[in-house]
Amino acid sequence: MKEYFPFFRNYRKALILAPTLVIIDVFCEIVQPKLMSKIVDLGVSQKNMSYVLHTGGIMVALSLLAIAANVGNIYYSSHASVGFAAELRKGMFNKIQKLSVSNIESLSSASLVTRLTNDVNILQEVIMMSLRLMIRAPLMLLFAVVIAININAGLASIIAIAIPVLAVIIYYILRRGLPFFEKVQRKLDKVNATIQENLVNVRVVKSFVREDFEKKKFGFSNNELREISVKASGTVVLILPVMQLVMNISIVAIVWFGGNKIISGTFQVGQLMSFITYITQILMSLMMLSMTLMTLARAAASSERILEVLNAKVDIFDSPSAIEKNLTVKLGKVEFENVFFKYHSDGSEYVLKNISFTILPGETVALIGATGSAKTTLVQLIPRLYEVSKGRVLIDGTDVRDYTMQNLRKNVKLVLQQNELFSGTIKQNLKWGNPEASEEEIVTAAKDSQAHDFIESFPKQYETVLGQSGVNISGGQKQRLCIARAILRKPSILILDDSTSAVDTTTEAKIRESFNGHLKDTTKIIIAQRISSILSADKIILLDNGEIIGTGTHTELMINNPVYQEIYNSQLLQKENEL
Amino acid sequence: MTNPTTSSGKLTLSGLPGRRARIAVEKPKNSKQVIFRLWKYLIREKSLLFFIVILLLINTGATLAGSYLLRPIINNYILPHNTPGLIRMILLLLSIYIVGSLAAIWQNRMMISVAQKTVSIIRSDLFSKLQTLPLKFFDSNNHGDLMSRFTNDVDNVSDSLNTCILQLFTSTITLTGIFTLMVYISPMLTVVTLFIVPFMLLVASRIIKKSKSFFTSQQVSLGIVNGYAEEMIRGQKVVKLFCYEEIVSADFEKINYELRNKATKAQYYSGVMMPVIQNLNTINFALTATVGGLLAIFRGLDLGGLAAFLQYSKQFGRPVNEISSQYNTLQSALAGAERIFQIMDEIPEIPDIPAAVSLTDVKGDVSFNSVTFGYDAGKVILNNISFGAKAGQKIALVGSTGAGKTTIINLLPRFYDIQSGQITIDGLEIQKIQRISLRRSMAMVLQDTHLFTASVMENIRYGRLEATDNEVIDASTLAGAHSFIQRLPKGYQTILRNDGDNLSQGQRQLLNIARATVAKPPILILDEATSSIDTRTEQIIQKGMDQLMQGRTSFVIAHRLSTVRNADEILVLENGEIVERGSHEVLLKQKGHYYQLYAGQFD
Ligand SMILES: Nc1ncnc2c1ncn2[C@@H]1O[C@H](COP(=O)(O)OP(=O)(O)O)[C@@H](O)[C@H]1O
Ligand SMILES: Nc1ncnc2c1ncn2[C@@H]1O[C@H](COP(=O)(O)OP(=O)(O)O)[C@@H](O)[C@H]1O
Ligand SMILES: [Mg+2]
Ligand SMILES: [Mg+2]
């Protein structure tokens, strides 16, 4: 609970005012029946017209006061609950930004999105409700009970039996229903994930004509969601009729005992009538209370999921000493010292095994190896997307963990193999590389990555709007935008992970050429498949199954590394055959 | 870029990356229409609904009868001191209440099951609808916003169906019942009671007008927030690499506060309805009590009668209050339903023409005759493309990025429809072939790899659902994927997550190739299928692919010479036009574009 306090910070006034206004409202409402019975018992029986009119006037005035109090309450409680939800979403989103890649992988993105909107909405609803009903219902209950006791303590003891009975029943119903709601939200995650996947994979679904298959798959998780929802709501909804029953039985008991009292002459009809009115009042407030409890049951499940995000242990963070030292990457020297890595700490085998090498500032190093030999894994350790399991990664002689991530990543730019662009204009996307970049800088970067020409060919040029993940441009165009984005601010270290695989060789050669101009001092690490892309590298590191099996220049490797020779020949042979 | 299916009132938010809502946000539609469509969904459960109404009548009848009995009990049994009669009446009252509660229990449970069934039908209809929409729709709509329609919007509908409908029903019935009783006891007092009704209606309609539009914009904002969050969480690696956390958070804050402002208004205007109505009711009660008191003084209304009437007048207020308290839920449900129906109203892929044929025994002759195409009306991407592939031939498409290679491939399965020209398969124009049959005749390996959350085995089997385990293994062996799959922790049973996040890019491509391989289609399309695969592995695949392509027409796009050199014909594309064509040898000798493209690979 206390995790939520900060999100209420801006709404303290509303949080106090809303319930206060409810108290006024309750007061107004509670005296109405009292006044009414006075009209009957004093006004009518004594035929006192002015008393009737006077009391009626007071009742109207009180109602008007109640309207004012209520409008105020709704005003403040909607501000507080919606405001809280907004702050909570912001807090969660900020927290998600702090989570590491593996943190997010384990929580799953579809589920995070559900939590951010759907679960937060449920909390918002319950707070809105609480700020009115959670105060109102118990107060009304209390007042009504007090007055009922005042009228006749003996009859009131019926309530003293009914309420604990109710409490026990409600407790059991809620206890049964609660776990279902947690499952509802989890099934909702699954539905959400299925939809997300279908949106991403729509071309695959269509090309294999698997619409019906997908519908069936969706139908399955949809059904699961339905079944569990029916169980959850079906359980808690029992509260209403059960409560109604208990209260109605109480009314019957009151009529019986009250009737007997009237028969024996110790009770009056008017008293019985108003007693029943208060019993109805009690019933109503219990009804409200239980509605709130039903919502609370659902909210408890959501709250747990939200807290899971807020309390998630961030596994990659800036150490205090890194913040204090505030080092920046300048030269661009990269060293791996006996690095071991695996994605899951419980995994059996290391993905990277005992990796050691040194790359000097300004060098161009090629990383090659078969598919799955862990090239991508290796380079992702440099900007600390993942943390080494054993050993050290050093940049300019300092462990990457001794830089703040901001300082580290500002100067180490990795172009991912799986490139990601965002919906928005081309310019907005490029500006990710440097939000303050000027027009010329953007154009220069685009020219260096051979993107300028095709951007210019679009009707809206740099203002062309890209769809989500850049669906409306070609694969090679995407890759070149990603490169442009990365070099917009000249980094000390540039890592290209297979970033030109969809780019034709001529264009690729041009990109390499412009790198030699503008990015001459930058340390470049290049993962590529084509030998032509790496021939000019100062050093080639050959990976196989997570281990380094050769390091050296092209000439050196040609002499002493059979695997390299094989790779070279696999490409060279073709050349000889063809030309 | 604009979605042709939506014409009016378009809202294009492009101020921030990630903020796009391409589905038309029309002026709040006629609520009646939305309610009617929802009703059509509900009414599918006719028999259950009928039952529910019966139970509901029993329940409300019991409640009404219970309070009606009070008067005779007081007047006829308690006041005359008739104890045996009182006992009888008490037992009667008790049984009425018990019957009522039992009915209530059943009615609630049944309603929930009807509501959830309805909601799940709506959800699955929405999903089915999604499956029929053209790629254009997906190109231009934000995933997270669409997801929000499935979860948040559907949830709103679900909430209201769960309780709202029932409450409205009960309240209306109770209202009618009580009204009748009131007229029966004192028509004069009834008129006084009704005096306040016009005021209530006036206040209600004022509030309704305001809150409706706020609810709609709240749901739209929620969709935007959902969309932005989804996109940024999925692109989190890039966010981290570019230290964009703060900027992204700031952008999120903006749309988040926009949502807050809209939601606050929606909550306020809808929330204020109930208490205001409730207190108007109390005023009403006060007036009735006063007038009733006066009537009793001057016209001799009996005490029991006055008490009962006041009781009804109080009860009259209750259903009115309940109706107004459901109002909030109802409004958000309508706003949600509106967004759901927006998708349902999107225009699907153009249906097959009635005379469309189903292909049997596809030979695989494919030809393009003067095909011209652009994704958007304004910009031509492919210009006058003509070529032919005879059955069993291998056609290679090469050219610089953005030349239009993928676009050509996209036209074959009719992902997009051409503007002019003709594409034929076995001499039949593809518009005249049933879409399903057309797509079944080909298997594609797309440039962007895509995998599903399922085991490796199931992912490959996606290509042909009937394929046996052995066929899957054979296909992956042919595709060069078998050896790495075996090394995965659980082999073919390893579960892939998040589009295959836990594999290397090359491994994902291998699985995509295996999936197409197992399909064994007459036409095979490989769009840069091995771009991330190392050359040694590629050599292995090459053999497999050559074997697979035997007797199949195949289209291959690649930048690597090794992949394209043995094609029967190579088409060189530049800026959407075929600039050179011929076999590898011929093209090399020409020393034109093709030679240029590949010269780089030999330096
Ligand atoms: N996020 C991840 N979680 C678990 N395993 C992974 C993940 N990413 C890659 N792997 C595994 O690590 C190995 C190396 O992958 P990767 O570094 O991407 O290879 P590549 O050399 O092709 O770039 C592969 O076997 C792959 O299955
Ligand atoms: N879905 C789309 N919507 C709009 N334009 C597109 C879409 N897909 C590709 N384009 C544009 O069409 C042109 C050709 O792209 P494409 O066929 O993917 O090229 P490639 O030859 O690299 O495969 C490019 O300029 C690209 O921007
Ligand atoms: Mg890789
Ligand atoms: Mg392409």
Image (spheres, coloured by chain):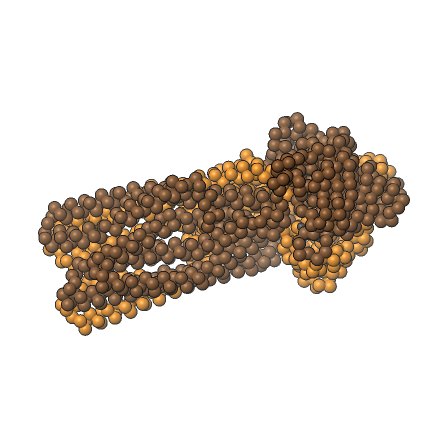
Q: Which image quadrant for residue A495? A: top right
Letter of the chain in brown: A
* Viewer-proximal residue among A499 and B551: A499
In the rendered view, does B371 fall on the left or right side of B392? left
Q: How many marks?
A: 0
User: Which quadrant of the rendered structure holds the N terminus of chain B?
Assistant: top right
Can residue B417 be seen here? The reply is: no
For the point 22% across and 43% down, the residue is A61
Whether residue A135 is visible: yes
- Which color is chain B depicted in? orange
Given residues A476 and B41, the one toward you in this image is A476
Query: Which residue occupies 79% across, 48% down?
Result: A548
Q: Position of residue B282 (x, y in %)?
A: 25, 49
Q: Nearer the viewer, residue B70 or B601?
A: B70
Up the image or down, A220 lies above or below A99; here it is: below
Q: Residue at x 69, y 28 (%)?
A: A444
Residue A26 x/y as whole percent = 29, 49
Q: Quadrant of residue A398?
A: top right
* B596 over A260 or under it: above or below: above
Position of residue B402 measured from the top left corner of the image (x, y, whole percent): 70, 38
